[in-house]
Structures are given as C-alpha cells and as structure tokens.
Image: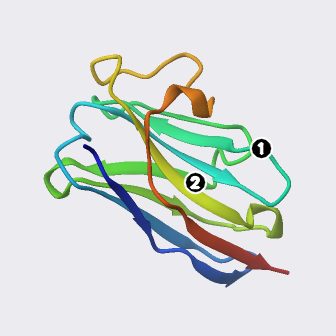
Amino acid sequence: QVRLEESGGGSVQAGGSLRLSCAASTVIYSRYCVAWFRQAPGKEREGLAVIDKEGIATYADSVKGRFTISKDNAKNTLYLQMHSLKPEDTAMYYCAADDRRSGYCSPEWFGSYEYGYWGQGTQVTVSS
C-alpha cells in the first residue's frame, strides 16, 4: 500500500513563494507517474503538473512558468515549487500517483480519475 503525505503549505502574500513536498512510504518516484492537483472550495479538482519516471514534466497552462514539479528518487519525495503566487492559487493541494503505465503518464494526466493513490492534502492560502 502506497501512502503519500504532503507538507509545506501555509499562508503567503501575493507574489510570494512556497515549496510543497510529498513524501512516499515506499519507492515510487522512479516507477510511477506522479502529479500535483489542487481543489478550491466549490470547484473541481484541477491537475497542475505531472512528472513521469524519466523526469519529463508537463504543466497546466494556469501554472506554467510559475510552478515547477520535481522529484528526488533517493528521498522518495516529490516537490512543487511555486512562485509568483496569486490569490486564485488558494486551494488544498494534493499529490497523486499512478502505477498502471510502468511509470509513464496518461495523455489525460490532468484527470483525477487517472490516479489511484492520493495524499491527504496541504492547504495553501494566498492573500492579496
């Protein structure tokens, strides 16, 4: 059973930065497709960024150029570096993992239905 645990959320002012982490209970980042999602109150869960076992990353347009996904396989940790934060980035942030494609990601990576493993989330609040 894979367990994921996010950390690093908090409150920042607009224009600030945060780095989120997602620690896995076992070795997955060299074998799974992993992603970051967020969900704001009253909104659907949104796929932000994904990275496959080879380190190839893809981003949603809403965060491209501001957020960077990365991973440290030796530490079993996934990261999301966020810069130039905006109030509309306020949400609960989740990491997710998919083991069905031998570490490669679905063309529909942005859909939450593609992932079987989820963390509990970490809250990010951006004030204006």
Mark 1 vs mark 2: in front? 1
Quadrant, the N terminus: top left
Q: x and y percent of residue 88 in the render? A: 82, 62
Residue beneath disc 1: 44
Q: x and y percent of residue 39 in the render? A: 70, 54
The amino acid at mark 2 is Phe
Tell me the quarter of the picture where residue 117 sits.
top left
At 45% from the left and 55% from the top, the residue drawn is 119
Work out whether mark 1 precedes mark 2 in sequence or the reverse, and give the earlier one: 1
Label 2: few (<14), some (14–19) or many (≥20) C-alpha neighbours in 10 Å: many
Residue beneath disc 2: 67
Q: Is residue 100 above or below residue 122?
A: above
Q: x and y percent of residue 5 in the render? A: 38, 62
At 30% from the left and 32% from the top, the residue drawn is 32
Horizontal side of residue 33 vs 38, given as left or right: left
Tag 1, which secondary structure?
A: loop
Looking at this view, name the residue that lies furthest to the left. Answer: 74
At 63% from the left and 29% from the top, the residue drawn is 111
Tell me the quarter of the picture where residue 60 sits.
top right
* Nearer the observer, 68 or 115: 115
Q: Are the two marked residues, 1 and 2, in contact with CB atoms closer than 8 angstroms?
A: no
Q: Is residue 44 above or below residue 19?
A: above
Label 1: few (<14), some (14–19) or many (≥20) C-alpha neighbours in 10 Å: few
* Nearer the observer, 51 or 111: 111
* Nearer the observer, 89 or 65: 89
Q: x and y percent of residue 61 in the render? A: 72, 38
How far is the residue under mark 1 from the one under mark 2? Answer: 20 Å
Quadrant, the C terminus: bottom right
At 74% from the left and 76% from the top, the residue drawn is 126
Horizontal side of residue 112 vs 26, given as left or right: right
Tag 2, which secondary structure?
A: strand
The amino acid at mark 1 is Glu
